[in-house]
Each structure stands twice: as structure tokens, then as C-alpha cells.
Image: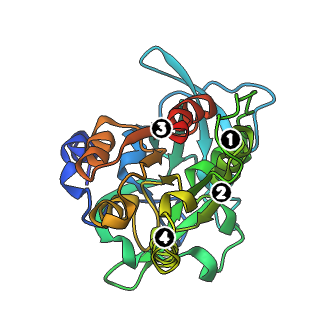
């Protein structure tokens, strides 16, 4: 597949809102010139093109090749094979650059080649415990192709945190709520969970969490059943639910559909918190009934979104 065809595939991404609630994701497959196959959620990729001229700059973080000018914006470019420190990495620089965006940061990823886009069921995406690699912390999940090839899905949040450090959370005004107010949140990224906890702690609310959509739904059902059995209000147990969009086993869209279809959760707002900030993803969130959509990771915007809902 040539670059023109790959660009046309990416250009159609924003029309794919029909994926909402289907528990399917689309993965852009690519190689680093090694024996492994890698993937990244299509929605995380803004564009794909040939590697442009890279300006070397001093004191760059590990794996960062330098800077490129992209339509008037200067962005850092990271060589994924060097960052992942593969033993069998090729000598030549990656010929293709994927442009990804997360938390208001735009970053170029150098890769050997981009293959194709595949669609997989989220329940076929597993946690990465079984990956025999030294880079487990940079892989968010794995899936398997029809021919048995394992695909390692990149954790963009962790890569950016490792390369450039985590965003510093400034002072946040506490919410005017009672001391037992609790938020339930779910996110498969360790980095994201850590930052969410910081925000919730500064808001002065308690929190419970899960690491994927299926675990979250199981725990939420347990809380709802307990509230029924004790005759208590589920809203006293959970004031608000914060869900990630893309997660192994069950994504945030399907999780939200389950919550909204269960009368026991009436009155409990669901906020989608996602690194996938395109208009398509916001439309997908609206399609399954989320009460608000917040792009990762801006602590001030997240807290300003949660506070009034917690104080209702």
C-alpha cells in the first residue's frame, strides 16, 4: 500500500462514528524494521507521510531525533525503534512518519513502514502481561492477527511521559461536597490513572477504579446490586463515573451503553475522558449518551468539568 492510499484511509477516519458502541477498534499496523508487528489506534494518528527533513537539536530526550516543521508548526520527532531500544533495530532511519496527538502535544513517530488498517473486537485485545519484551511498560495491550501474528499496541501516554515527563497539576479548587462523595473511574493507562487520582484528591473526593471496561462493568454491577440489597441509593456510593474511550476487553463506548441502559444508574453522569480528541470521537461519545467529553490530559479542564456535576 503506498502513502497516497494510506492517507486516504486516514482521511476517512472522522466519518467512522458508527464504531460507537460496537466494541470494535481500528488499528493502524506498522513495522520498525524488526521482526515484531506494532499497532496504534487509528484515531490517535493525525496523518502519515514520508519522513521530512529533521533538524538536530541539542539536549533532546532519549529517542528524539530532532525537530521538523509541519505546516508552520515545529514538532519533535521520536524514533520508535531507538526509543524501544530493540536489539535487532535497523541501521537506517525510519522512512515513514506518523503524526500523533495527545494532551495538546503533537509528536512525530518515525517507523520503518505503515502496513494497513485492521478492525478488531476489543474483547480480542488483551493486557500485555504475556509480551516477551523489555518494553512492556510502553505497550498498552496486544491482539492477534488471523495468521497468528501478535500485534503490540503502543501506549502513547506512557511513551510521551517517558520522553518528555508528565504534566504538572496546578492548584485545583476543592469541590463543595460531603466527605463521602465518591467517583468511579476506569482507565487502562497507568499514567492516566495516576493523574486522575491527583485531580480527584485535589477536588477532595474519594475514588474507586478499574483498569478495563469489563472489570469496570463487573464492579459497577456489584455496587448496584449491593445498593439494591441494602435499600441504599447507588448515587450515595457513586456520584459520577469517568470512563476512558479505548480499553482492552470492553471499550468505553460499550461500557457507557451498558450504564445508560441500566435504570439503577439513572442520575449518575458519565464523563468520557479520552486521548482521542477528534470530532469523530466526540460524536461517538454523544451517540452512546455520555454527559460530557473531556480530552486528555488537561487537569484544569477535567476538574472544571467534574466539579459542577459533583456539586449538583
- Given the current orientation, which residue lies at the most extreme right position? 59
CB under 8 Å between discs 4 and 3:
no
User: CA separation, marks 3 and 2?
Assistant: 20 Å
User: CA separation, marks 4 and 3?
Assistant: 23 Å
Give percent across and percent down for residue 159.
64, 50
For the N terminus, the image quarter is bottom left
Q: Nearer the viewer, residue 290 or 274?
A: 290
Would you say residue 170 is visible in this rendering?
A: yes
Which residue is identified by label 4?
A: 220
Q: Secondary structure at mark 3?
A: strand
CB under 8 Å between discs 4 and 2:
no
Q: Earlier in the sequence, mark 1 or mark 2?
A: 1
Residue 295 numbered tag? 3
Q: Nearer the viewer, residue 50 or 265?
A: 265
Which residue is identified by label 1?
A: 199
Q: Residues within 10 Å of mark 4 (few under 14, many from 20)?
A: many
Which residue is identified by label 2?
A: 207
Q: Residue at x 31, y 82 (%)?
A: 146
Amino acid at each position: 500500500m503506498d502513502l497516497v492510499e494510506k492517507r486516504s484511509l486516514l482521511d476517512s477516519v472522522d466519518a467512522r462514528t458508527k464504531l460507537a458502541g460496537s466494541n470494535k477498534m481500528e488499528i493502524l499496523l506498522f513495522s520498525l524494521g524488526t521482526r515484531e508487528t506494532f499497532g496504534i489506534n487509528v484515531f490517535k494518528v493525525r496523518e502519515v507521510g514520508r519522513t521530512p527533513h529533521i533538524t538536530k537539536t541539542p539536549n533532546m530526550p532519549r529517542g528524539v531525533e530532532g525537530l521538523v516543521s509541519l505546516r508552520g508548526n515545529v514538532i519533535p520527532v521520536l524514533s520508535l525503534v531507538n526509543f524501544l531500544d530493540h536489539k535487532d533495530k535497523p541501521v537506517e532511519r525510519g522512512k515513514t512518519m506518523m503524526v500523533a496527538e495527545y494532551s495538546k502535544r503533537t509528536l512525530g513517530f518515525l517507523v520503518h513502514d505503515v502496513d494497513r488498517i485492521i478492525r478488531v473486537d476489543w474483547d480480542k485485545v488483551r493486557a500485555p502481561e504475556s509480551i516477551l519484551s523489555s518494553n512492556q511498560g510502553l505497550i498498552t495491550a496486544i491482539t492477534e492477527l488471523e495468521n497468528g501474528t501478535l500485534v503490540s499496541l503502543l501506549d502513547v501516554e506512557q511513551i510521551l511521559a517517558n520522553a518528555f515527563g508528565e504534566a504538572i497539576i496546578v492548584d485545583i479548587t476543592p469541590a463543595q461536597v460531603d466527605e463521602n462523595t465518591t467517583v468511579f473511574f476506569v482507565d487502562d493507562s497507568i499514567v492516566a490513572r495516576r493523574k486522575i487520582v491527583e485531580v480527584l484528591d485535589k477536588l477532595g473526593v474519594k475514588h474507586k477504579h478499574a483498569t478495563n471496561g469489563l472489570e469496570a462493568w463487573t464492579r459497577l454491577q456489584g455496587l448496584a446490586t449491593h445498593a439494591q440489597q441494602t435499600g441504599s441509593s447507588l448515587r450515595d456510593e457513586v456520584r459520577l463515573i469517568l470512563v476512558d474511550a479505548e480499553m482492552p476487553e470492553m471499550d468505553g463506548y460499550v461500557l457507557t451503553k451498558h450504564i445508560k441502559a441500566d435504570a439503577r444508574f439513572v442520575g449518575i453522569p458519565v464523563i468520557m475522558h479520552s486521548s482521542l480528541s477528534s470530532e469523530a470521537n466526540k460524536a461517538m461519545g454523544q451517540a452512546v449518551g455520555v454527559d460530557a467529553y473531556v480530552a486528555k490530559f488537561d487537569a484544569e479542564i477535567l476538574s472544571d468539568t467534574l466539579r459542577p456535576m459533583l456539586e449538583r
